[in-house]
Amino acid sequence: MKKPSLNPAARRSDIIPIKEGLQALVRAYRLQGKLNEVTVVGSWERVMGKAVALKTQEVYVNKGRLFVRLNSAPLKHELVMAKTRVAELINAEVGEAVISEVIFL
């Protein structure tokens, strides 16, 4: 019979770190895709800057496409010209290719 450890800080074999447990949970319920989409929407202001975020009305992801509704026609025109760069910046922020296309509304 195994003798219990006297050190309360000693790890037991059935205990795993919270990070590993949450990662296993995300994998088990296949939530990584949705979490990445939420990360994209949440990081829009940080990636594009405050000036663009102030002119943004709505940001959402649907089937790998990022939809952005803007209230400034000149800004929309400028971002349409750089939409591949915007997709690259967003994907770099998330760490994987989540966005395949950016559509400005």
Image (tube, rainbow, N blue to C red):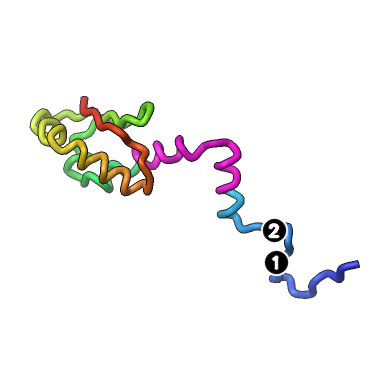
Find the magenta span and give its range: 23-41
Relative height, residue 48 to residue 11 (above, below): above
Residue farthest toward the bottom in the current orientation of the protein: 6
Which image quadrant: the N terminus? bottom right
Badge 2: residue crowd in 10 Å (few <14, some 14–19, many ≥20): few
**Helix, strand or loop for disc 1:** loop
Residue type (three-letter) at the residue carrying disc 1? Arg
Residue 11: mark in rendering: 1
Residue type (three-letter) at the residue carrying disc 2? Ile
Which residue lies at the image location 79% right of the left edge and 72% below the top edge? 5
* Marks 1 and 2 close (CB-CB < 8 Å): yes
Residue farthest toward the right in the current orientation of the protein: 1
Relative placement, left or right, of 56 versus 25 is left
Residue 42, how many percent across, how many down? 35, 41
Residue 15: mark in rendering: 2
**Where, by quadrant of the figure, is residue 28 drawn?**
top right
- Inspect the magenta stretch and tell me whether residue 31 lies in it: yes
Residue 50, how many percent across, how many down? 21, 45
Which residue lies at the image location 20% right of the left edge and 42% below the top edge? 85
Residue 54: mark in rendering: none
Which image quadrant: the C terminus? top left
Relative placement, left or right, of 86 versus 37 is left
31 or 75: nearer the viewer: 31
Relative placement, left or right, of 85 versus 90 is left
Q: CA distance from mark 1 to mark 2?
A: 7 Å
Which residue lies at the image location 22% right of the left edge and 44% below the top edge? 48
**Where, by quadrant of the figure, is residue 11 drawn?**
bottom right
